[in-house]
Image: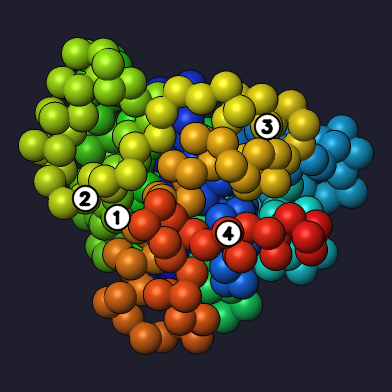
Amino acid sequence: MKTFALVNQKGGVGKTTTALNLASCLAATERRVLLFDLDPQGNATSGLGINKNNLKSTSYDVLVKNQPLSDTLLDTKIPHLKIIPTNTQLVAAEIELVSAFSREKRLSSVLAAYEKDFDYIFIDCPPSLGLLTVNALSAAQGILVPVQCEYYALEGLGELTQTIEMIQQHLNPSLKVAGIVLTMFDGRNNLSRQVAEEVERFFQDKVFKARIPRNVKISESPSHGLPILLYDAFSKGAENYMALTAEFIQKFEAQTQTIDTPQIDDEITDSGLSLEVINKAIGDS
């Protein structure tokens, strides 16, 4: 797997936060990463310090106007991390693609031509199960589902599972749930623990061991246009996202040798990525 869609039709679960911070941490290990912002709110775009109101082209142009991906790619403050930005213009895509040929496969066709340019592609989806999300699920090999550790999160998982099964049957048979990321976790809260236990019971080894807590630094970093790795690399939130990244590498690269990357063991400590890698990312930016 190398193309992952971050999906949850419920908003406010840490989907975009997980997309940009996981992508940033992987890029800090010198893996070539693309973050495709497919959410019209453009939070992944602004979260990386890019002005949404001053874009020459966006994901709308890629999907609707067939503009080459290379004309829309932007560099970020993290070396090796590029982004396809977006803004509210993407809202129109849901309507304009309705009559388009192979409308559910537009994104898949676009990304297929650029897969060799990146080690990982992350698609940040809108908080809905509309045509944009269907495009992401058709293009991805794996789904990452951020789940907020609250009661209503469990209700939404049932609807998402049904949508995934539909996509598997009709559009993308190889699509799999690659991982569940537990977000806004509070170990002192009985409900948080109960939700985590229920998700683990249902999804078993799909659930990442690294859990993302509520953290002030994580909440502050988007307003500064920085991923947590650059905003405060020594915060608890950064530590947890680095632990998630280390687990992600072990989970998906230990099974394949198709990606030519530095040795994993050199990059991982007990808590996540090494401080050497963090300092290099901060220094380069």
Q: Secondary structure at mark 1?
A: strand
Q: State if disc 2 and disc 1 touch (CB < 8 Å).
A: yes
The three-letter amino acid code for the residue at tag 2 is Lys
The one nearer the camera, 77 or 242, is 242
Position of residue 166 measured from the top left corner of the image (x, y, whole percent): 25, 45
Give the label on residue 275, or none.
Answer: 4
Instruction: State whether residue 105 is above or below residue 222.
Output: below
How far apart in space, not on screen, are marks 3 and 1 (Cα)?
Answer: 27 Å
Of tags 3 and 2, the one toward the viewer is 3
The three-letter amino acid code for the residue at tag 4 is Leu
- Which circle's residue, 1 or 4, is located before the other in the chain? 1
Which quarter of the figure is the N terminus placed in? Answer: bottom left
* Residue 118 shows up from this direction: yes
Left of 15 or right of it: where is 172? left
Location of mark 1 (residue): 178
How far apart in space, not on screen, are marks 3 and 2 (Cα)?
Answer: 28 Å
Location of mark 2 (residue): 206
Of tags 4 and 2, the one toward the viewer is 4
Q: Secondary structure at mark 2?
A: helix
Location of mark 3 (residue): 221
Farthest residue, direction left: 201
- Which circle's residue, 1 or 2, is located before the other in the chain? 1
Give the label on residue 250, or none.
Answer: none
How far apart in space, not on screen, are marks 1 and 2 (Cα)?
Answer: 6 Å
The three-letter amino acid code for the residue at tag 3 is Ser
How far apart in space, not on screen, are marks 3 and 4 (Cα)?
Answer: 19 Å
Position of residue 249 measured from the top left corner of the image (x, y, whole percent): 39, 65
